Image (cartoon, rainbow, N blue to C red):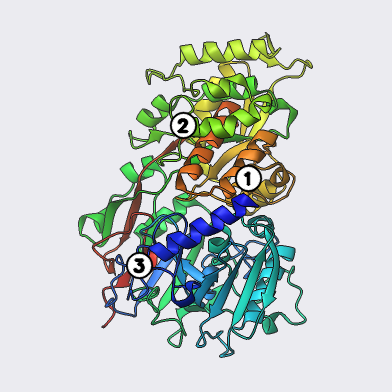
Amino acid sequence: MRKRCMWGAFFFLLLWASGWVWAGGETMHALSLGEKPRYGPDFTHFAYANPNAPKGGSLRMEALGSFDSFHPFIMRGVAASGLNLLFDTLMTSSEDEPFAMYPLLAESVTLAEDGSWVRFTLHGEARFHDGTPVLASDVAFSFRKLVSEGRPHYAKYYRDVAEVVVEDERRVRFDFKNAENPELPLILGQLYVLSEKDWEGVDFGRSGFRVPLGSGPYRLESYVPGRRVVYQRDPEYWGRDLPVNRGHYNFDRLSYEYFRDATVSLEAFKAGYYDLRREHTAKIWATQYTGRAFRDGSIVKKKIPHELPAGMQGFAMNVRRSLFQDVRVREALSLAFDFEWSNRALFYDQYTRSESYFSNSEMAAEGLPSQGELAYLLPLKELLSPEVFGPLPQPVESDGSGFMREALLKAADLLREAGYDIRGGELYTPEGQPFTFEILLHNPAFERVMLPYVQNLRRLGILARVRVVEPSQYIQRLRSFDFDMTVAVFPQSLSPGNEQQDFWSCKAAETPGSRNVGGICDPAVDALVQAIATASDRRALMDACRSLDRVLRHGHYVVPNWHTSVFRLAHRSHIAMPAKHPPYGLGLWTWWDKNARL
């Protein structure tokens, strides 16, 4: 109880002392986790947006795979790209500060002095696309539906909400089970609001091409199933003049063109079938963005630096499989990846090796545990390997020649220690079965990365097979955890919180569709994830994240890949963007068409 009151007082006093609490010490114009919001109550627009950007024109973008649904809130079906543009949330974040939320559907927000509840007061002008008002009852309906029938992460994000109460037409209050989750008011601000009336008599769990009623800046204009989806800017959008929206949503028409294959997609871009492309493959960026359109300036190629945490991308092992349950085996598999050779031969030296689950972030652990980290780790000592309290595991660097003798020798020693033995050039498990597994991919471009890795595994006697499947099958297999190894991405925000439950917790490991694709289930990890969600200030949050980072890295659950701190972009010359880019995002919706009139 003391912790609850101390946190509530801390949060309240922070806002009051910073000038962000209005009359009566209750109503606020913004919420921020541990830092003063950058923008005051009278701000007119975000600094990285051009409030005078012209409206009009179009932006055509790409999507890979296919789609068969306009219902993005449930597990069934593959939702079309861009559907978030149809819906507003209670609040919205800026892209130039770590984690602050500003009113969107909500006109203001009130936080209890003891942190036990939060109230959102809706804009009186807020309207759905059919002209009906957005009411507090719609907010309550949306919350209940998403938590009970939506994607699993909603229930995890909002697990500490005890009750949602409709106080009147415009005011809705969320009561908390406790006041130990300071992030909760902010992530409630991220809630998408659906129309309760629109869903009357409709099965919420049914996928398909029914278009839910939204209140966002765009409406669905047209679509070709699995091939194209087009959105039209709503000139009557109720929130077009809000400070958070000024200079945003400038294109009259947005479309997503679908391609089954990334190679075909690139050629279509160069031929003029769409306008904007983000490139994620270093070799393609270095060798294939060439031709007349690049020489004559019709296509602009650029790198935009950013300060976003890189998180972790890696070859994730499914530890639900008995083959990957020994940490020594997982470490041996990590040692077989030759990053130095891959970076030189495949990536044109464009990447940095990822070691941390919080790469490119102050949350990444370094050196030996600090006193702040030990405060989290020592109570878990009986659950942790003694190695967690020592130096962090380091990859064995190769000379880039393509044969990593030292690393493979160490990997072979670990496998022998785990009871594996070589017979006739093949590795056998302690149970006498050949060590063989499948690497599941959906992007053929990754084969060139995996095949050298497979060759190194073969030197250890391990037979790994690469299988590339089409995107929809890949999604379904990941949702049901039907794989041995795959490429997984665990993105991190500037302020980690409840989402860590979906990445690492035992409950998520058992929940189909969760982001704990590797099946990690460790009581020490669960405890540290909870510590992150309940951290009382920025310092405590960093220590909790660094502690979790240590435990995960010593667990060798993934073969760490690489990261970069730039966006690689190519776009048609008619696309314009503000001179100032936000540090924590691309700022895509602040761009405009040069051909549009003021």
In the rendered image, the vertical position of residue 588 relative to residue 317, given as above or below: below
Q: Is residue 455 visible?
A: no
Which residue is the site of mark 2? 355
Q: Is residue 120 visible?
A: yes
Q: Amino acid at mark 2?
A: Glu
395 versus 261 height, above or below: above
Choose the circle earlier in sequence order: 1 or 3. 3
Q: Choose top left, top right, bottom left or bottom right for residue 577.
A: bottom left
User: Residue 136 sits in which quadrant?
Assistant: bottom right
Residue that appears at 51% across and 49% down: 496
What kind of residue is marked 3?
Answer: Tyr
Disc on res. 530: 1
The answer to which of marks 2 and 1 sits earlier in the sequence is 2
Q: Residue furthest front?
A: 2
Badge 1 marks a residue whose secondary structure is helix
> Residue at 48% across / 21% down in the picture?
391
Q: CA distance from mark 2 to mark 3?
A: 35 Å
